[in-house]
Amino acid sequence: MVVPVDVAVFAALAAASFPAHLLADHPFQSTSCAEAKGEHGRAGRAACARHVATVVAFQAAAVGLIALVGGLSLNPLAVAVGLALTGWSHYWIDRRFTAAGLWEAIGRTAFARLGAPRPDHDDNPSLGSGFYRMDQDWHTLWVALTALVMASTGLMLNILLCLTVMVMVAAILASRHGRRLLAQPS
C-alpha cells in the first residue's frame, strides 16, 4: 500500500519554505551573484552555485525550525532529497539561458520580454519583467514540490522523486529545443 503524504506536514513545510526562499532569493542574494549567475562560463556557474547554496541553507533552516517547533517527525532522506531538488531546480532556472529556452519552447517568450529594458537603454531597472515573474513562479512550484517530497516516506517518496526528476528532465529537454529555436535566424 502506498502511504499518502501527510498533508499537515506538507503544509507546514511549504509555509516555512516559501518565505525562506523569498529571503534567500532577494535580500540575502549578493549583488555579485545576481549579476553574474546567468553568465556563461566558470564565473557564472560559480556565482549561481553560491546563490543556490544560500537558498538551500535558508530552506534547510526553515524546515529544521518548523520541524523543531512543530514537533514534526521527518524522514531525513526525504528532507535531503527535497533540498537536493531545491538546489537542482533553482540552479537550473537561474542560469537564465535555460529559462529563456524553456519560455521559448512553451511559447512564453513574448511574456518573458514584457518590462525588459530595450537594447542600449536602461529604461526599466526593476523586478517587474515577465521573465522575473515566471522565474518566481518556477521557484514557487518547486517550493511546493520539495515540501511534498520532504513530507513523504517509503514508496511515496520514491514515486514523488521519480515524478519530480521527470519534470526537471522535461524542462531541460524543452529548454534545449527552445534554445535551438532562439538560435535560428529570424
Image: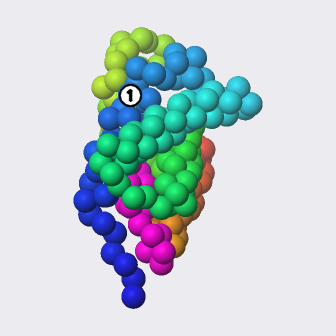
Residue at left offset 51%, top offset 67%: 161
Dominant SS of magenta comes to helix
Specify start and end residues of the magenta stretch as a single range: 138-157
Query: Left or right: where does residue 118 sit relative to residue 15?
Result: right
Identify the residue at image location x=55%, y=54%. Answer: 80
Classify 10 Å Cα crowding around label 1: few (below 14), some (14-19), many (20 and above): some
Q: Which residue is mark 1?
A: 23
Residue 147, given in percent of the width and then of the height, sits at 38, 54
At 48% from the left and 23% from the top, the residue drawn is 29
Whether residue 38 can be seen here: no
Residue 162 vertical placement versus 19 (above, below) = below
Tell me: residue 173, above or below residue 87.
below
Along the viewing direction, whichever of 48 and 82 lies nearer the viewer: 82
Instruction: Report the front residue among 86 and 17.
Output: 17
The image quadrant that residue 92 belongs to is: top right
Report if residue 5 is visible in the image.
yes
